[in-house]
Image (cartoon, coloured by chain):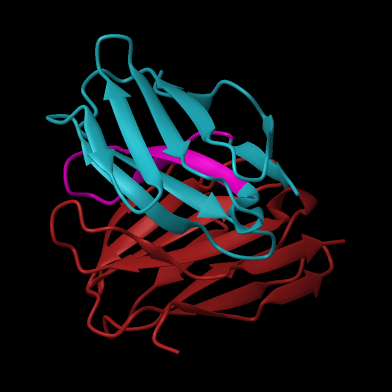
Chain colours: A red, B cyan
């Protein structure tokens, strides 16, 4: 499978715990994006990387959230001290970075904070 | 502020009929628009895109129309099939060549056999 891969698919955690998600983009895609989607809504942009550089962070991304892409390949998204409002689908997408090149999305990680 | 929205949350059509899903956007400076399809438990899947210098673009069974005068985008699906049942989102790119997309709320397409 050469698509965008996300792990885990589902994560259930208790409020206050830390969680980390992983995204493996399509090979050789230099852009990687994180989005968040709540039930019944469209995805919301969180942040994106060009290779290992984080180029933009949304105001939605509080200081409890941190994303990394240390080698310009896979990326991790960590949420510290989770809150019930963090419950959502976290989607990763990648693209080649060419103008108007479409984003390919993974199947997401569904986070439930109890 | 910027927003991308859809007119109807749910659209129900008979198999074989044509479907039209509408979207209104507010940022007149937007240059690039995309339609995505999302099935349950999956991420959004690219359907078709259009740039602001075009008013129509066709794909396989799908057509996107862009009316910049009224800031309206539509997706037409010909001969709708059960496999087309999904949530459809329009999205606009925020900033040229960023890949940062602003999505609407989505329209659920239900195809009746």
- Residue at the extreme top of the image, as rendered: B70
Using the rendered view, name the quadrant where residue A73 is placed: bottom left
Which residue is painted at 37% across and 26% down in the image?
A: B73
Quarter holding the N terminus of chain B is top left
**Frontmost residue, A23 versus B57:** B57
Considering only vertical position in the picture, is A74 above or below A47?
Answer: below
Which stretch is magenta? B87-105
Residue B96 in magenta? yes
Can residue A105 be found in the magenta stretch?
no
Question: Residue B93: x, y in percent?
Answer: 29, 40
Q: Residue furthest right?
A: A114
Q: Is residue A87 left or right of residue B35?
A: right
Measured as percent of width and height from the top left, residue A114 is found at 87, 61
Quadrant of the image occupied by residue A89 = bottom right
Q: In the rendered picture of this protein, how many numbered marks are placed on residues?
A: 0
Residue nearer the viewer, A26 or A44: A26
Q: Is residue A71 visible?
A: yes
Say above or below: B111 vs B74: below
A86 lies above or below A41: below
The x and y percentages for residue A113 are 80, 61
Q: Residue at x 58, y 68 (%)?
A: A108
Residue furthest to the bottom = A1
Question: What residue do we see at 72% from left, 65% from top?
Answer: A111
- Left or right of residue A81, residue B96 in this image: left
- Residue drawn 35% across the image and 43% down it: B34
Along the viewing direction, whichever of B67 and A108 lies nearer the viewer:
B67
**Residue A61 can be seen, yes or no:** no
Image location (x, y in percent) of residue A106? 50, 70
């Amino acid at each position: 499978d050469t698509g965008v891969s996300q792990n885990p698919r589902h994560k259930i955690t208790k409020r206050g715990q830390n969680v980390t998600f992983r995204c493996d983009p399509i090979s050789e895609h230099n852009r990687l994006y994180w989005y968040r989607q709540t039930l019944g809504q469209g995805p919301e942009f969180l942040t994106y990387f060009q290779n290992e550089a984080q180029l933009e962070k949304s105001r939605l991304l509080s200081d409890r959230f941190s994303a990394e892409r240390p080698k310009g390949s896979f990326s991790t998204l960590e949420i510290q001290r989770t809150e019930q409002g963090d419950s959502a689908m976290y989607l990763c997408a990648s693209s080649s970075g060419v103008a108007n090149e479409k984003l390919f999305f993974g199947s997401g990680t569904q986070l439930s904070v109890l | 502020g910027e927003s991308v929205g859809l007119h109807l949350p749910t659209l129900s059509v008979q198999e074989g009929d044509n479907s039209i899903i509408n979207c209104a956007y507010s940022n007149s400076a937007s240059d690039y628009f995309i339609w995505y399809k999302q099935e349950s438990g999956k991420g959004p899947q690219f359907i078709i895109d259009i740039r602001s210098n075009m008013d129509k673009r066709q794909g396989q069974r799908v057509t996107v129309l862009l009316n910049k005068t009224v800031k309206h985008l539509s997706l037409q699906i010909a001969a709708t099939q059960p496999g087309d049942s999904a949530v459809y989102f329009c999205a606009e790119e925020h900033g040229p060549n960023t890949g940062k997309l602003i999505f609407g709320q989505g329209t659920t397409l239900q195809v009746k056999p």
